[in-house]
Image: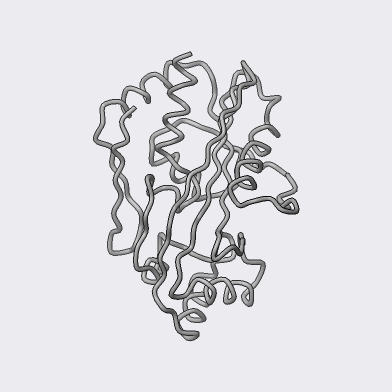
Amino acid sequence: MGKCLYYQTDLAGTFLFKCFHFGFFLLQMTLSMNTQRIILASSSPYRREILTKAGLDFTWHAPAIDESRYIGESASELVKRLARTKAETLSEKENSLIIGSDQIAECAGHIFGKPKNRSEAIEQLSRASDSTILLHCGLALLNTQTQNCSVIHETCEVVYRKLSRQTIESYIEREQPYDICGSLRIEGPGIALLKQVKSNDPNTILGLPLIQLFDLLSEQVQK
């Protein structure tokens, strides 16, 4: 499976991606002939948008799980556990491929997720200012026919510009980024907060590493 996805930002800052490898289209054709349903175990509109743009036929359900971090649990362990747990909440769905995903941000050993309110969003972005944030994304794919669950961990390194208090507050007032990890709404004006993004998969920053997902799907449908 070739890893040939690329992204860019248009004038509105919206992420677009294109695939240039025949394997992508071959996988779509294989999935269309596969009788198993694809179900996204997430309520995230960003993950749904990624799958829709990728041309996958899927449904989604919002899993109700406890996302609390265990004492001493690392960021990578946390996102993998939560991704698996989300997928397994739908394990009773027959003849299905269940996608679970979770994302967390880490800065200098401090781990944080979605901000609960304005003051927490300000705190997150103040911590990120002139620093590098590591976005951890866990991805799980559960085959309910075999009960085989594959889980991977992908990271995205995000380098922030030096942000003034006024810049942070203006951004938060405009974007209201309370539904997204680290208070960063990358597909909008939030892109202006960044210097650089480093990742093997550009979709990782949006919470769903698509290249890795297609690899996992390909492995399942070829078994």
Here the colouring is one colour
Foreground residue among 204 and 80: 80
Q: Residue 56 appears at what percent x and percent y?
A: 43, 32
Up-down relation of residue 32 to residue 24 (above or below): above
Foreground residue among 126 and 170: 126
Q: Residue 87 appears at what percent x and percent y?
A: 64, 34
Q: Residue at x 45, y 39 (%)?
A: 51
Q: Residue 14 appears at what percent x and percent y?
A: 35, 57
Left or right of 159 on screen, residue 110: right
Q: Residue at x 49, y 20 (%)?
A: 220
Left or right of 5 on screen, residue 65: right
Q: How many badges with numbers are in the image?
A: 0
Foreground residue among 160 and 71: 71
Residue at the extreme top: 223
Left or right of 21 on screen, residue 101: right
Quadrant showing the N terminus: top left
Up-down relation of residue 123 to residue 91 (above or below): below
Up-down relation of residue 148 to residue 86 (above or below): above
Q: Quadrant of residue 180?
A: bottom right
Q: Residue at x 63, y 51 (%)?
A: 74
Q: Residue 140 appears at what percent x and percent y?
A: 57, 35
Q: Residue at x 53, y 28 (%)?
A: 38
